[in-house]
Amino acid sequence: MAHDVAAQVRGYMVVFGALLVLTLATVGVSYLRLPETPAVLIGISIALTKAALVAMYFMHLKGEKPMVYWPLGLTAFLFVGLIAGLLLSEGDHLFGTQFGDAFTTD
Amino acid sequence: MEIPYTTEVRPDTGLTNPKLGIWLFLASEVMLFGSLFSSYVLLRSGAPTWPVQHEVLSVPLAALNTVVLIASSVTMVMAWASLAPHAAAVRDRLRSPNARAMASPAEASAEADSLKRYRLFMGLTLLGGAIFLVVKAIEYGDKFSHHLYPATNNFLGLYFTLTGLHALHVIVGMIVNAYLWGPGTRMWRSEPERFANRIEVAGIYWHFVDVVWIFLFPVLYLL
């Protein structure tokens, strides 16, 4: 038992270290002033990796029962659907027509 | 009325009720924050011009807050890890007719140490939450002193809405954690497994708050 706990704590520390490195990487990449598309892709990819580490190890999602995965899978599907639905229905500026003066500038 | 399946696993779900409950609640939270993130994408992509975010906001303060919140997630999971392995042993001893006689000095010492460690780590988690809120208050104060308000432009409207809602979640988490650090600890002496499960469920919520910030940091400050 004591050995299991010690291994578990070591695992948490490794994840902590990885999260700190990834945070440093996020900030570092932002100073490269990359064009918008690669900057967004890299920034979101790092955030997804960090979120996955927290969910898998700290939230104990790794090895969790299927009854947790099903609602979360449905949520992920609905989340993507929400963003896609909104952009496809309202974001015609992304696919051709620009909104006129619907948005204020600074 | 006794709440069923707080410690024993429900046969049909394979989970305790609190754990299933917190995950379903967090699913609704994903949609809440998802709607705001969608608004951000729509408004930013449709705006002819958009402020250079890292010039308006403080990246060093936000990076500090990211580290603080991640560290508080680590201390939260350590608080749970301090208690959970001892919960079954404490329960068995409590159920025994001669409970006091059952615990050897070594066992009693290990159990007392585990509670002390739990309090330490949960206290550090609370401290992390408090530091996060203080830094956030400094950031807000700086914006207000420069006459930057939610109504100033779409970006600041989204910034204050998203970070304000997130800060509200931090406050709620801190209230729950403070209860579990203080008066809630009594349950450890009567229902240790249930108490350990409470810490795990409160932890899952706290880590979710961390996950939301992990996305807010690059989206609002860096990109």
Image (cartoon, coloured by chain):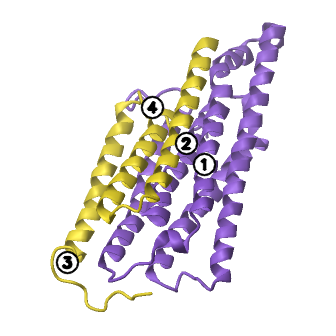
Say which mark, if any, is on residue A20. 2
Between B142 and B181, the one lying in front of the other is B142
Q: Quadrant of the C terminus of chain A?
A: bottom left
- Measure the C-alpha gap from mark 1 to mark 4: 32 Å
Report which colour depicts chain A: yellow
The mark nearer the N terminus, 2 or 3, is 2
Q: Residues within 10 Å of mark 4 (few under 14, many from 20)?
A: many
Say which mark, if any, is on residue B152. none
Q: Which chain is purple?
A: B
Q: Is residue B104 above or below residue B132?
A: above
Secondary structure found at label 3:
loop
Q: Mark 1 = which residue?
A: B67
- Measure the C-alpha gap from mark 3 to mark 4: 44 Å
Is label 1 on the same chain as label 2? no
Q: Mark 4 = which residue?
A: B15
Contact between labelled residues 2 and 1, with CB atoms less than 8 Å apart? yes
Q: Residue furthest left?
A: A96
- Chain to which mark 1 belongs: B
Q: Point out residue B203 in the picture as x, y percentages from the top left corner.
A: 58, 41
Secondary structure found at label 4:
loop
Q: Residues within 10 Å of mark 1 (few under 14, many from 20)?
A: some
Between B74 and B188, the one lying in front of the other is B74
- Name the residue: 73% across, 47% down: B179
Instruction: Say left or right for A69 vs B211.
Output: left
Q: Point out residue A74 in the picture as x, y percentages from the top left corner.
A: 30, 48
